[in-house]
Image (tube, rainbow, N blue to C red):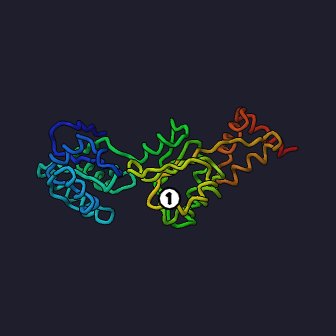
Amino acid sequence: MKKQISYDDSPTLYLIPTPIGNFEDMTFRAINTIKQVDILYCEDTRETIKLLNHFSINKKLVSCYKYNENNVKNKIVEDLKSGKNVGLVSDQGCPIISDPGFVVSKEVIDNNFNVVALPGASAITCSVMTCGIDANHFLFYGFLNSNKSKRCDELEKLKFVEFPQIYYLSVHDFFDYIKDFYDIFGDRYCSISHEISKLHESIYRGNLSEMLEIKDELKGEYVIVVDGYKNNFDFNNMSIKNHVKLYLDDGETLMNSFKKVAKDRGVSKSIIYKEYYKEDSD
């Protein structure tokens, strides 16, 4: 076990969130940290320079994006070894959260330097707060696979998750993605947020079937919050064996199927176990 003392004045990698649309969401601490670090690594220097110019900050920028992280990570460790403090930003939002940064931060941690994350703007929290779904617990999934077959496999594994789920969507495949949600999850309630924090922010709330009708209105990237699985099925007229088979067909083990059936029916697992094998012997 290793313990990090985050503010011990040792060379540190700072993970700095940036606004997802509105520059006014930049925190005072983030601005001051960018000013104070010796080097700022960023996903796209063209995007970051706009942010720095807005706040009249002059800082050396070095690219750190998805395809060069494995090379850049060693340079950042060398910077830290030489006593420099390093900042890392992605284009919008928080580094590492569906953005570059993990490879670098893991290498820094493995070399026993501090990694400090600053609070800041997040499309995840904004979309959850405005979705109109009870989200005391939720699953953030991020981007689904762009390949339809693999994407559907992902959704099949997620369809029985009882918590609201958050995904990032690109408008280019919006209709296909929503159709996959609808086909696999059923016609669940959802919320789709667009242009979060910007002047033209819009939020669509309704069932997935309704979202299929608005594809021509949409441009850009979106955050979708889909309600969790609700077990409203009446199992009273279904045999224990067929009920267990529902879960077996979805890839669950026999014992996990017993647990799920017991939960569905509000009885103990031992009762399901006995009834299942009793039906076999009858």
* Residue 270 seen in the current view: yes
Image quarter where the N terminus lies is top left
Q: Position of residue 41 (x, y in %)?
A: 22, 56
Tell me which residue sits at (58%, 66%) in the image: 149
Residue 241 percent across, percent down from the top left: 78, 46
Whether residue 172 is situated above or below residue 194 in the rendered picture: below
* Residue that appears at 27% across and 53% down: 89
Q: Which quadrant holds the C terminus?
A: top right
Task: Kindly state the secondary structure of the residue where label 1 is placed.
Answer: loop
Neighbour tally class for label 1: few under 14, some 14-19, many 20 plus, Cα within 10 Å: some
Q: Is residue 236 left or right of residue 41?
A: right
* Relative horizontal placement of residue 140, taking residue 95 as reference (left or right): right
Residue 141 appears in view: no
Rendered location of residue 245, percent (x, y) = 74, 50
In the image, residue 132 above or below residue 218: above
Q: Where does label 1 land, which residue?
A: 144
Q: Residue at x 61, y 53 (%)?
A: 208
Residue placed farthest to the right in the image?
A: 282
Q: Is residue 244 above or below residue 156?
A: above
* Image quadrant assignment for residue 116: top left
Residue 168 place in picture, x, y as percent: 47, 55
> Taking 114 as reference, is 150 left or right?
right
Q: Nearer the viewer, residue 197 or 131?
A: 197
Q: Amino acid at mark 1?
A: Leu
Residue furthest toward the front? 199
